[in-house]
Amino acid sequence: MSKKFQVYKQNILKQEFFVLDVINFLLGAVIIVIAAIALFGEGNLILHSLVFLLGGILMLLNTIKNLKRKSLLAVTFALFTVLMFGIFAYILYYGIRTGVM
């Protein structure tokens, strides 16, 4: 059984996008936790901006993955990446301008 597991593990690690998928999973989990804390907690502006920053990074990783696959979905992810980073920049600008951050 352990020999089959080792072969299976080697095949998975050889896959092209395995590392990106693991990073996507972990980053998605972190975003969910931070979003829950931001919405149900104090509602700190830094946490809200962090959610959009991490969301932009997540979308950027998906854009890179789909660009390598030459998928049309990459354009959609690219648009959402720009949107996420734009919202992050706006929240950061608003926080600095109002003195909240």
Image (spheres, helix red, strand yellow):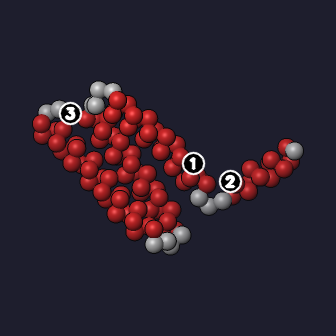
Please tell me which residue is depicted at 16% across the width and 38% down the height of the picture. Answer: 96
Residue most toward the top?
42
Q: Which residue is mark 1?
A: 22
Dot 3 surroundings within 10 Å: few (below 14), some, or many (20 or more)?
few
Residue type at numbered disc 1: Val
Residue type at numbered disc 2: Leu
SS for callout 1: helix
Q: Which mark is residue 13?
A: 2
Are the residues flagged by discs 1 and 3 in contact, CB closer than 8 Å? no
Please tell me which residue is depicted at 12% across the width and 36% down the height of the picture. Answer: 98
- Determine the image quadrant of residue 32: top left
Q: Which residue is mark 3?
A: 101
SS for callout 2: helix
Q: Position of residue 40 (x, y in %)?
A: 35, 29
Q: Is residue 62 left or right of residue 87?
A: right
Are the residues flagged by discs 2 and 3 in contact, CB closer than 8 Å? no
Q: Nearer the viewer, residue 57 or 30?
A: 30
Compared with 20, 42 (above or below) is: above
Are the residues flagged by discs 1 and 2 in contact, CB closer than 8 Å? no
First in sequence: mark 1 vs mark 2: 2
Q: Position of residue 44 (x, y in %)?
A: 27, 31
First in sequence: mark 2 vs mark 3: 2
Dot 2 surroundings within 10 Å: few (below 14), some, or many (20 or more)?
few
Gap between marks 1 and 3 measured at Cα: 32 Å
**Quarter the C terminus occupies:** top left
- Determine the image quadrant of residue 72: bottom left
Q: Position of residue 78 (x, y in %)?
A: 38, 63
**Quarter the N terminus occupies:** top right
Q: Nearer the viewer, residue 26 or 13?
A: 26
Residue type at numbered disc 3: Met
Please tell me which residue is depicted at 28% across the width and 31% down the height of the picture. Answer: 43
